[in-house]
Image (cartoon, rainbow, N blue to C red):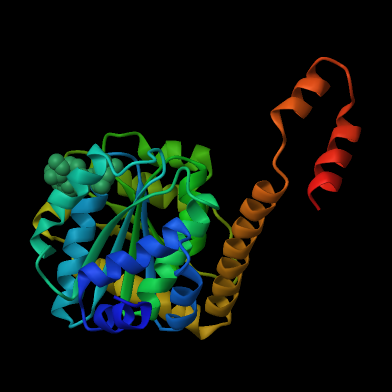
């Protein structure tokens, strides 16, 4: 199938066509520029979902899909595994948890492996988000496990980032230490059926009260959920909607989107520079054994391949 036919099929809800288009972008095939040219624009709400392993992200995503589908919205999900170059075990688990929606043509779920791809996480996931938005999805959810830099990059992609915590995991305090709280727009205390959930909410509230905010600044709400029983989901959906309204009210959304585009371009430029100005093994050897110095080597890398 030619790219324009694939695009038409994908817009009509053909998931295999959507998958092939994303693969083209991820792998940087000859068709990739045409795909990017044909599929752009759109007006999706992009929701990042992050938190420690096992906190309930995929279960929550599945519940959110249910709520948005009931509202008649088309939902795309990218489950990112930053640690693996393959779509491995953890992602298989995600698929099982979202299996309720596997046959719904209004839902598209994909696992994204980011390591080893040109431009890394920001570039590949950014391109996939952009594609789903351009294909007419109303909501694009990006799930990523909370492992430092990766989740910060994912948050940069999203309009609204949910940070999931669960009672008894010492998550609140750890998240604060790691600076992760700064990326959250909405806190979700999941597994609210477990002992200690109220304490976790209380701790979070106390922490938040220490943060000074200017008038008009966003105050992160704290939502309690039992994702496995789809409890608390309506409140969470409302909180996400409120954040979206707040973003759209000022110029926050435009700023976020511009930053996101800049980050994506940056990642691709970096990748392209690395490709063009590769460091030859022999040159590294020469610096290592003192035959030449680093500055001269830099000159040779830049000069030789310019
Ligand atoms: N008791 C309870 N269990 C839950 C809840 N939400 C999810 N779980 C369970 O927690 C486990 C992990 O859920 P996942 O949704 O896979 O968690 P995750 O954060 O996506 O995990 P990774 O993708 O591996 O990082 C599963 O056994 C879920 O059934 C909840 O609200 N209450
Ligand atoms: Mg998961």
User: Which of 151 and 84 lies nearest the eye of the viewer?
Assistant: 84
Location of residue 137 with respect to 225 vertically, above or below:
below
Q: Describe residue 169's horizontal placement relative to residue 146 as left or right.
A: left
User: Which of 15 and 50 lies nearest the eye of the viewer?
Assistant: 15
Which residue lies at the image location 72% right of the left edge and 33% below the top edge? 280
Q: Where does the image place residue 109, in percent across and percent down from the top left?
A: 24, 62
Which residue lies at the image location 47% right of the left edge and 75% below the top edge? 36
User: Which of 200 and 240 lies nearest the eye of the viewer?
Assistant: 240
Indicate the quadrant containing the N terminus: top left, top right, bottom left or bottom right.
Answer: bottom left
| Residue 12 figure quarter | bottom left
Q: Describe residue 23's horizontal placement relative to residue 95 as left or right.
A: right
Location of residue 291 with respect to 47 vertically, above or below:
above
Location of residue 294 with respect to 102 vertically, above or below:
above
Q: Is residue 102 visible?
A: yes
Q: Where does the image place residue 14, in percent across and percent down from the top left?
A: 20, 75
Q: Describe residue 184's horizontal placement relative to residue 293 as left or right.
A: left
Q: Describe residue 120's horizontal placement relative to residue 201 as left or right.
A: right
């Amino acid at each position: 199938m030619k790219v324009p036919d694939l695009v038409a099929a994908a817009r009509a809800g053909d998931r295999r066509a959507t998958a092939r288009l994303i693969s083209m972008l991820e792998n940087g095939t000859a068709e990739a520029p045409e795909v990017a040219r044909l599929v752009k624009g759109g007006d999706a709400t992009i929701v990042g979902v992050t938190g420690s392993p096992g906190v309930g992200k995929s279960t929550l995503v599945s519940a959110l899909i249910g709520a948005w589908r009931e509202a008649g919205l088309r939902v795309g999900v990218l489950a990112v595994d930053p640690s693996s170059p393959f779509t491995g075990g953890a992602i298989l688990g995600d698929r099982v948890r979202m299996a309720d929606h596997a046959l719904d043509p209004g839902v598209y779920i994909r696992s994204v492996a980011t390591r080893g791809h040109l431009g890394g996480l920001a570039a590949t996931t950014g391109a996939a988000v952009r594609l789903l938005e351009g294909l007419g999805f109303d909501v694009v959810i990006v799930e990523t496990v909370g492992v430092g830099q990766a989740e910060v990059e994912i948050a940069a992609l999203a309009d609204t980032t949910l940070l999931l915590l669960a009672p008894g995991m010492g998550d609140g305090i750890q998240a604060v230490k790691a600076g992760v709280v700064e990326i959250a727009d909405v806190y979700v205390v999941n597994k609210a059926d477990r002992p200690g959930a109220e304490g976790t909410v209380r701790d979070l509230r106390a922490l938040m009260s220490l943060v000074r905010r200017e008038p008009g600044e966003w105050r992160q709400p704290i939502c309690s959920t039992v994702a496995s029983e789809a409890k608390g989901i309506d409140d969470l959906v409302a909180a996400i909607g409120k954040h979206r309204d707040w973003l759209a009210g000022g110029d926050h959304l435009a700023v976020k989107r511009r930053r996101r585009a800049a980050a994506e371009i940056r990642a691709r430029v970096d990748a392209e520079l690395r490709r063009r100005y590769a460091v030859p093994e022999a040159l590294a050897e020469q610096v290592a054994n003192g035959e030449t110095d680093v500055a001269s080597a830099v000159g040779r890398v830049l000069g030789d391949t310019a």
